[in-house]
Image (cartoon, grey):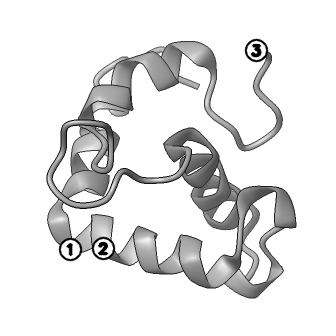
Amino acid sequence: MEAKRYELSDGQWDRIASLLAGKAGDPGRTGADSRIFINGCLWVLRSGTHWRDLPDRYGKWTTVHKRFSRWRHAGIREQVFKTLTADRDNQ
């Protein structure tokens, strides 16, 4: 799959998929497609727009923002950042 602007490449996704909460086997609910969620967060953060302007293809902006906040408090966002920035050639 070719990554669109602001979205994760397959290689980036492969490096972080196991770090994400909400996958089968984790306690609690299994999250909706985490890659779509991550790409939605990246779209907001990289474009500099408001959460309310998140394109529909990423889901409801309120749901994406709540999940983003939960992951921030759980430290998941920091783990993902460290993993992706460990590769100096990461785009």
Q: Give 33 or 72, whichever is nearer the viewer.
A: 33
Q: Secondary structure at mark 3?
A: loop
Q: Residue at x 73, y 58 (%)?
A: 58
Do the numbered discs 2 and 1 sit on residues whose CB atoms are within 8 Å?
yes
Q: Residue at x 30, y 37 (%)?
A: 24
Relative to 27, residue 80 above or below: above
* Numbered label tally: 3
Question: Where residue 62 appears, x then y in whole percent?
Answer: 60, 84
Estimate how packed mark 3 is, as few (under 14), some (14 to 19) or many (20 or more) residues with alpha carbons within 10 Å.
few
Q: Which numbered disc covers residue 1?
A: 3
Determine the CA span between mark 2 and mark 3: 28 Å
Q: Which numbered disc covers residue 65?
A: none
Quadrant in which the N terminus appears: top right
Estimate how packed mark 1 is, as few (under 14), some (14 to 19) or many (20 or more) residues with alpha carbons within 10 Å.
few
Q: Residue at x 38, y 29 (%)?
A: 17
> Which residue is the site of mark 1?
73
Name the amino acid type tagged 2: Arg
Determine the CA span between mark 3 and mark 1: 31 Å
Estimate how packed mark 2 is, as few (under 14), some (14 to 19) or many (20 or more) residues with alpha carbons within 10 Å.
some
Name the amino acid type tagged 1: His
Judged left or right of residue 14, residue 20 is left
Name the amino acid type tagged 3: Met
Q: Give 88 or 20, whichever is nearer the viewer.
A: 20
Do the numbered discs 3 and 1 sit on residues whose CB atoms are within 8 Å?
no
Q: Residue at x 45, y 80 (%)?
A: 66
Relative to 66, residue 89 above or below: above
Question: Where residue 77 appears, x then y in whole percent?
Answer: 31, 55
Disc on the earlier residue, 2 or 3 = 3
Question: Where residue 32 appears, x then y in whole percent?
Answer: 52, 52
> Which residue is the site of mark 2?
70
